Image (cartoon, rainbow, N blue to C red):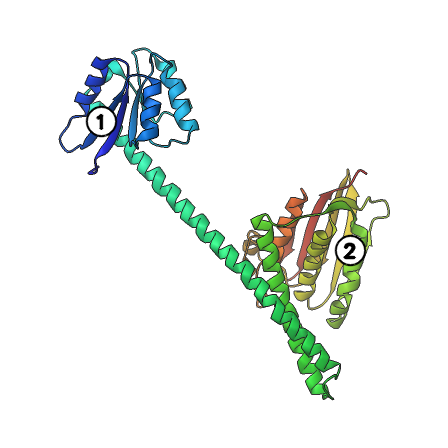
Amino acid sequence: MNQTLRILIVDDDEVDRMAVRRALKVDGLSLKISEAGDCATAIAQVDQHPFDCIFVDYRLPDSDGLALVKQFRSQGLTIPLIALTGQGDDQIAVELMKAGASDYLSKSRINSGRLVQTLQSVMRLHQAEQEAALATQQKEELAKQREDFVSRMTHDLRTPLIAANRMLQLFQEEVYGDITPEMDKAIAVIIRSNHNLLEMVNNLLEVYCHEAGYKQLNFTNVDLEEVISEVVQELNPLAEQKHIALTAYIDDNANSVVMGDRVELRRVFINLVSNAIKFTDEGYIKIELTEHDSLVTVHVQDTGSGIRPEDQAVLFERFRQGNHKRSTSGLGLYLSRRIIEVHQGTITVQSEVGKGSIFRVQLQASQE
């Protein structure tokens, strides 16, 4: 420690204050020492001057060191506080440490080596904590800047994508003149690619809203049977294009109603079934809803390529994806997990490479 340390000694006994001053006078240690004989004076000095460390005696005329330590910490003072106690005051020392003291010394054991060693130790620890706090703050600020950039970027990307798709649809409808079958196919490919990109942008925006706390959910009674029926109806044409059977089975005795946000829950099942279609080249996709002990379980099973065990472990993390040539942004399953967790539910996967996967969503059935 090469810089001059500003020290405050709080003790009502002049002899004890002198003992601390003398113990701190060592070569190589530059100090500027101030003194206070009671709590009120100490508080006033701290309000007026910045200090690097404070020595606090436990027994003070207008209060005690424990109350003073508590007050300093409650005011947000983070500098080291070293408590000075009498011999045999071990329990008091424990209470002082719990209140926020950085360390303590018995007055009977004060000497130059011990006092300087304690001061240097708490100052090194305080410096490390300050550096860690600064690094954390910088990391959080950088993360916020990145998330804000992502938010603006996704908003800016959506508008031209939507406009481009609308223009392409007008070409398909031959509003601007006749097109050949080859041109029609090419336009369809572009529209589909734009749709996939728009879906990624929307997922990115949804992730940002959830993580930033901007997402407002509208919880009502949601019938998952209806949601699943809509999902099957919407995505069945995609399954038919690949000659994949997409079916749903709902247990007649199941209570399929849960409390949740219908739009967000629908997003989860759209994502799960879309992924199943994407990674299944032949066979079937089956959605099954059951309910037992007020727990609604939805399985989405496919006969696709399957997921390796090492990929399953990170599948629901942000920007993680399986080792597959058709893998996408790695946001859909992460977003699905976030949504299900907000609904106090769980989402898991079982899979075997070459045989397919089963995604399981579990939510509490509504009792209303």
Residue position marked by numbered label 1 in the rendering = 33
Image point 67% across, 80% down: which residue?
Answer: 187
Image point 44% across, 53% down: which residue?
Answer: 142
Q: Nearer the viewer, residue 60 or 189?
A: 60
Question: Which of the two discs, 2 and 1, sits closer to the camera?
Answer: 1
The quadrant in which the C terminus is found is top right
Furthest residue toward left: 27
Q: Secondary structure at mark 2?
A: helix
The spot of residue 358 in percent (x, y) is 68, 54
Tell me the number on the disc at residue 228. 2
Q: Is residue 311 above or below residue 41?
A: below
Mark pair 2, 1: CA separation: 73 Å
The spot of residue 57 in percent (x, y) is 31, 17
Which amino acid, mark 1? Ile
Which amino acid, mark 2? Ile
The spot of residue 360 in percent (x, y) is 69, 50
The quadrant in which the N terminus is found is top left
In the figure, is residue 95 to the left or right of 120?
right
